[in-house]
């Protein structure tokens, strides 16, 4: 269902809704509901922009402009569409990522302070990777209590767009169609979750309307352009001349204002959003003289971190586990030991110390991602042997692992090269409240405003849940290792 063809079919179903604005030009209502059309919105991940940037030898920012022109501009897909429909707003999921970093830190600090039924068990495991979530729900339900309850940036952005546009324009959520451009095929699985629909935040008794209607990958974005005979490489690398305001002034500033920078951080944060990096920086900022130390684990995709005080005391321990081979080791350590049926026997299964006590990791937080190397290496990213890079038809060359690693390094370089806003200069007072370039107070004020204008409790807007899924995957003798080998191939994915 979720493909570039579906996107084009949706755009061609009926004339899109027409926005009606007030004296300031801010949309307040819509026209054309009787014709069956919708409002079309898109969100774009920084990893997808990096993939496009590496492919066409442009900067990450220029890649973003090219994507906007494809989805919304006169030279893009609407030029050959039946009703000339296009995407009214194209937003950057980096904005939602900032909110997730702040909320995720609050979740960790709450769990450290006083663990309750509403907070995850230690160690808290990240939940923004749908391949990892699918794996946990189907094969390792014992780790579900450890999962962060926070939505991913994709899901949070979907909820923000659907709730705000629905309330502000007075239209039902099914008249808003949202596509996300992502580096990973597994994000399609996430978009399909029943927990991420208006049945949760809207309180409807029906199955619900998805917050993210469709997900297409970086590679499928180029297929979208080809289907409409748009030559992507020739799209403008400058901003669209005009943009329509978002219906709420504060959220318009949050989503689109150039008065605040929105970057991908530094290489220490990794290519998967920087959840762990931000938490480490926050805890270090709360303890004068504290330092963040790191050490490599058994391979490059396992890293251990600690925040150490001035006098050498360890304040916080965390880790990063990327790739299914490493994840398998992590969940094994978290598996509770079963008591022996023999009198005086040692516990069976699970990692344990002499004496029968569990020796699971003593981390407070673990960043878990399915793809080796992180999200820039997602299965939906453009690869070095794709026709757009290596040639077409008979000229296509099948390249090996070394070339793919060199290509991934190029994508990573584009990801980390994202510029700060050119016109943003923080004041001395701003710097007192900044953590790794992010303003937590501003984020929290904006989220509170969002909750107020929609009339929905913030808990229902930003958190989700997980469930054990009955599956035969990995249940047969020897099958688990085969599944891990398939899932752990270069490019990642479940």
Image (cartoon, rainbow, N blue to C red):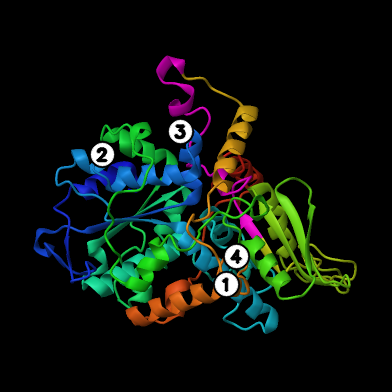
Circle 4 packing at 10 Å, graded few (<14), some (14-19), many (20+), is some
Mark 3 highlights which residue?
A: 56
In the rendered image, residue 73, in percent from the top left (x then y), is placed at 27, 45
Q: In terms of sequence position, does the residue under pointer 4 or pointer 1 come before the other?
A: 4
Secondary structure at badge 1 equals helix
Question: What residue is pinned by disc 4?
Answer: 141
Magenta-span inclusion, residue 464: no
Residue 75 image label: 2
Distance from disc 1 to disc 3, alpha carbons, whole Å, reads 37 Å
| Helix, strand or loop status at disc 2 | loop
Q: Secondary structure at mark 4?
A: helix
Nearer to the camera, 102 or 392: 102
Going from N to C along the chain, the mark reached first, 1 or 2, is 2
Of all residues shown, which one is farthest toward the top? 394
Picture coordinates of residue 307 (x, y %)? 77, 67
- The earlier-in-sequence mark between 3 and 2 is 3
Q: Residue at x 66, y 74 (%)?
A: 121
Q: Is residue 209 above or below residue 184?
A: below
In the figure, residue 353 lies in which quadrant?
Answer: bottom right
Q: Is residue 230 above or below residue 448?
A: above
Residue 258 location (% of width, % of height): 43, 60
- Residue bearing mark 1: 430
Q: Which residues are magenta?
A: 367-395
| Lower position in the chain sequence, tag 4 or tag 2 | 2
Mark 1 is surrounded, within 10 Å at the Cα level, by few (under 14), some (14 to 19) or many (20 or more) other residues, namely few
Check residue 370 for magenta coloring.
yes
Q: Work out whether residue 492 can be spotted.
A: no
């Amino acid at each position: 269902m979720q493909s570039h063809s579906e996107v084009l079919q949706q755009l061609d179903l009926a004339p899109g809704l027409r926005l009606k604005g007030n004296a300031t030009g801010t949309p307040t209502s819509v026209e054309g509901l009787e014709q069956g059309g919708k409002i079309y919105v898109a969100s774009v991940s920084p990893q997808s922009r990096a993939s496009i940037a590496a492919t066409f030898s442009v900067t990450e920012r220029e890649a973003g402009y090219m994507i906007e022109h494809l989805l919304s501009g006169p030279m893009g897909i609407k030029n050959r569409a039946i009703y000339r429909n296009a995407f009214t707003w194209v937003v950057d999921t980096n904005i939602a990522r900032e909110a997730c970093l702040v909320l995720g830190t609050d979740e960790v600090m709450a769990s450290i302070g006083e663990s309750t039924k509403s907070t995850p068990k230690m160690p808290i495991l990240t939940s923004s990777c749908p391949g990892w979530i699918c794996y946990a729900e189907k094969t390792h339900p014992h780790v579900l209590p450890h999962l962060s309850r926070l939505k991913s940036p994709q899901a949070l952005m979907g909820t923000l767009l659907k709730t705000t546009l629905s309330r502000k324009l007075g239209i039902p959520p099914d008249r808003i169609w949202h596509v996300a451009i992502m580096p990973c095929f597994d994000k399609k699985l996430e978009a399909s979750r029943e927990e991420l629909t208006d049945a949760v935040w809207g309180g409807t008794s029906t199955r619900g309307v998805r917050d993210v209607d469709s997900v297409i990958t970086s590679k499928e974005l180029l297929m979208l352009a080809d289907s409409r005979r748009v030559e992507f490489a020739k799209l403008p690398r400058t901003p669209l001349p005009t943009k329509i305001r978002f219906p709420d002034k504060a959220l318009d500033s949050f989503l689109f204002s150039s008065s605040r920078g929105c970057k991908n951080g530094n290489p220490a944060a990794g290519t998967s959003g920087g959840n762990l990096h931000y938490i480490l920086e926050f805890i270090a900022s709360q303890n004068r003289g504290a330092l963040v130390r790191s050490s490599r684990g058994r391979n490059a995709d396992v890293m251990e971190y600690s925040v150490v005080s001035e006098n050498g005391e360890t304040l916080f321990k965390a880790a990063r586990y990327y790739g299914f081979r490493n994840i398998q080791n992590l969940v094994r350590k978290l598996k509770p030991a079963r008591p022996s049926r023999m009198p005086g026997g040692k516990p069976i299964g699970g990692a344990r110390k002499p004496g029968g006590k569990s020796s699971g990791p003593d981390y407070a937080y673990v960043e878990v991602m399915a793809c080796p190397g992180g999200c820039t290496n997602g299965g939906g990213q453009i690869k070095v042997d794709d026709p757009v890079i290596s040639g077409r038809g008979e000229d296509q060359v099948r390249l090996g692992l070394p070339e793919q690693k060199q290509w991934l390094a190029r994508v990573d370089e584009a990801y980390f090269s994202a510029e700060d806003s050119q016109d943003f200069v923080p004041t001395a007072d701003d710097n007192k409240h900044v953590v790794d370039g992010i303003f937590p107070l501003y984020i929290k004020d904006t989220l509170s405003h969002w909750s107020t204008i929609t009339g929905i409790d913030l808990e229902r807007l930003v958190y989700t849940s997980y469930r054990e899924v009955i599956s035969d995957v990995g249940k047969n003798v020897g099958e688990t290792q085969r599944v891990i080998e398939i899932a752990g191939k270069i490019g990642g994915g479940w």
